[in-house]
Amino acid sequence: MNSKASCLVSFALFLLFSSAAAAFNITKLLGRHPNFSSFNDYLTQTQISQQINSRNTITVLAVDNKAIASISGKPLDTIKKILSVHVVLDYFDVQKLTMLPKKTTILTTLFQSSGAAANQEGFLNVSLVNEGEIAFGSAVKGSILTAKLVSSVAAQPYNISVLQITAPIVPPSIDQAASPPKAAKSPAAAPKKSPATPPTQAPSSTPAVEAPTPSQEVVADAPVVSPSSAPVADAPVVDNTPVGSPTADDEITPSPAPASEPKSDSSHTGVAFGIAGVGVVMGLVSSLVAF
C-alpha cells in the first residue's frame, strides 16, 4: 500500500510540475522587450493576452513600437481583430517555418476561432520567398504578403513562440468594416458617384418669391378695386329741372304727341278759331289789294 501511495504522489507531482512548466504569460514575456511595449499594451487592453495564456500551443507574431503605430489610430475593437490575426493556433519557430513542406501554407489564427471572421479573414498565408525569406499576409483573396519574418523573440517548445515581423497584417475586409460611412481611407473609401442625388441648388442672389397666401393670391390674380381706385363709370346726369318741364332740346324740336292719345275738346276749339282768324286776315289783305 505504501509503495502504491508513493507512486500516486509522485505521479501527481509530475503532472503538477509539467503543468507549471507548460504555463506561460505573454505579458511577462513581452515585458522583457521594451521595443514591444505598445504591442504588449494592446494585448492587455483588448484582453487577447488572456486568451493567449489560456492556450497550450500558440505562436504570436509581434511588431515593434514603430510598426504598430500604423494601426494605433483605429478603434480598439478593430485593433483587437487585427491582433487576433497575429496569433496562430499552433507552434511555429523559425526552424519549423523554414522547413515547411510547401512554399505556401495556410495558418489558422485566433480570429478564426472567434466566429467573427468571414471570407478567409481568420487565416494567414505564409510563404517562402527570395531564397529562404519568410513572408506573411492575409489569406483573403487578392491580398498580398505585407510582412516578413525578422527573428525569434521568445520560445517555449512546444507551447509558445513569439516571432517578430516587419509590419502588422491587416485583412482588407477588416479595415473596410472598421471605416465609417465616409469610408475613412480604406479601399471602400474610394469616392463613389452619387447615384441619384440631385445637386443642391445654390441660393440665388435674387430674393426668393414667397408662396402667396390666399389673401395675396386674390391681390395678384384679381385685384380688388376699391371705390377710390375703381374707374369712374358714366354716372347719370342729375337733372335739376322739375319733372315735366321742357328742356332746351324740347323747345327746338318739340316731340309730337302720341297719335294714340285722344284729342280733347279744347284742341278742336283752338283749331276752329285759327281757321277763322286766317280767313279774316286774308279778307283784309284782299281789300287792301283792291284799293
Image (spheres, grey):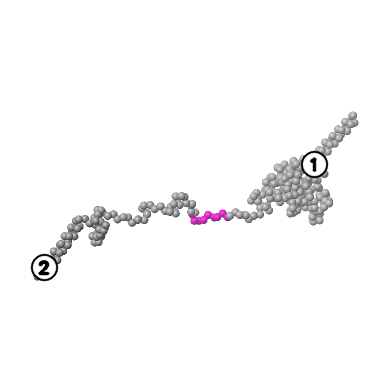
Please report the residue visible at 88 percent of the width from the left and 31 percent of the height from the top. Answer: 5
Please report the residue visible at 75 percent of the width from the left and 44 percent of the height from the top. Answer: 113
Q: Nearer the viewer, residue 105 or 257?
A: 257
Residue 142, above or below 52: below
Quadrant in the picture for residue 41: top right
Picture coordinates of residue 266, whole percent (x, y): 19, 56
Quadrant in the picture for residue 19: top right
Picture coordinates of residue 150, whole percent (x, y): 77, 51
Q: Is residue 125 magenta?
A: no
Rounded to the nearest angstrom, the CA distance separating label 1 from label 2 is 178 Å
Picture coordinates of residue 48, whole percent (x, y): 73, 43
Q: Main secondary structure of the magenta part?
A: loop
Quadrant where the C terminus sits is bottom left
Quadrant in the picture for residue 77: top right
Q: Is residue 201 magenta?
A: yes
* Mark 2 burial class by Cα count in 10 Å: few <14, some 14-19, many 20+: few
Q: Mark 1 or 2, which is nearer the eye?
A: 2
Mark 1, secondary structure of its residue = loop
Mark number for residue 287? 2
Q: Nearer the viewer, residue 120 or 272?
A: 272
- Name the residue type under label 1: Asn
Residue at the limit of the structure toward the left, as seen here: 291
- The residue singled out by tag 1 in the image is 56
